[in-house]
Image: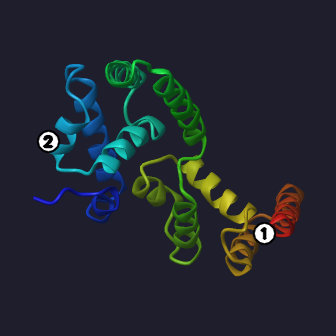
């Protein structure tokens, strides 16, 4: 049986299913004995080595496993590294970086592609923010942030931005809203110049 790589897994699962799968593999890894490592896990799940590493990294970054599991994963990876190379220095640095990414991801849990898709669905398809939050397994405030970041960083075209701006100003033309869009205009222009 051919082992699956990460992109093959993504093609057959939606966001919720992918997160559940990543959690399952990471928890399985964390809850097995120290001697059980990559060869066993990759064989058990029929995944490639690179897929295995991505899954363990994403489990930490995405926050789909709790801190206790992350600590156990780090301990186990350090133990195995110590056995193979005599040191766990790289593992400790790697998990420190993953924890940093985990904190950042908690603030903005989307890729550029996902943020653009959210903005497109909201503007062009008229999908509500509540429905988007369900679809992307997140909160409405994070959907707002995805839309904002997509606009601010010029990930969406001016035409999309102008539609949002028009409808927002039509619904609320208060000074606060007008100033918000002036600031957003400035940020978009600044980001165009710097790119």
* Outermost residue, bottom side: 159
Seen at 74% across and 76% down, the residue is 162
Compared across the picture, whether 60 is left or right of 102 comes to left
Seen at 23% across and 57% down, the residue is 4
SS state under label 1: helix
Q: Quadrant of residue 154?
A: bottom right
Screen quadrant of the C terminus: bottom right
Q: Within 10 Å of the Cα at label 2, are there few (<14), some (14-19), or many (20+) other Cα atoms? A: few
Q: Within 10 Å of the Cα at label 1, are there few (<14), some (14-19), or many (20+) other Cα atoms? A: some
* Dots 1, 2 in contact, CB < 8 A: no
Q: Quadrant of residue 56?
A: top left
In percent of width and height, residue 42 lies at 21, 43
The label shown at residue 169 is 1
**Above-or-below relation of 61 to 96:** below
In percent of width and height, residue 78 lies at 39, 21
Compared across the picture, whether 11 is left or right of 98 comes to left
Of marks 1 and 2, which one's residue comes earlier in the chain?
2
Screen quadrant of the N terminus: bottom left
Compared across the picture, whether 157 is left or right of 90 comes to right
SS state under label 2: helix
Alpha-carbon span between mark 1 and mark 2: 55 Å
In percent of width and height, residue 75 lies at 37, 18
In percent of width and height, residue 89 lies at 50, 22
**Above-or-below relation of 34 to 143:** above
Q: Which residue is mark 2?
A: 44
Residue nearest the observer in this picture, 15 or 78? 78
């Amino acid at each position: 049986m051919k082992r699956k790589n990460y992109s093959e897994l993504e093609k057959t699962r939606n966001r919720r299913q992918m997160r559940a799968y990543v959690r399952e593999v990471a928890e399985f890894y964390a809850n097995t004995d120290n001697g059980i490592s990559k060869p066993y896990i990759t064989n058990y799940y029929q995944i490639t080595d690179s897929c295995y590493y991505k899954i363990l990294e994403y489990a930490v970054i995405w926050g789909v496993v709790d801190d206790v599991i992350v600590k156990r994963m780090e301990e186990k990876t350090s133990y195995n590294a110590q056995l193979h190379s005599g040191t766990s220095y790289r593992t400790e640095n790697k998990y420190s970086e993953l924890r940093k990414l985990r904190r950042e991801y908690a603030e903005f849990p989307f890729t550029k592609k996902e943020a653009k898709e959210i903005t497109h669905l909201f503007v062009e398809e008229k999908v509500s923010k509540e429905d988007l939050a369900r679809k992307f397994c997140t909160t409405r405030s994070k959907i707002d942030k995805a839309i904002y970041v997509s606009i601010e960083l010029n990930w969406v075209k001016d035409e999309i931005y102008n539609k949002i701006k028009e409808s927002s100003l039509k619904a609320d033309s208060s000074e606060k809203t007008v100033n918000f869009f002036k600031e957003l205009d400035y940020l978009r222009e600044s980001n165009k110049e710097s790119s």
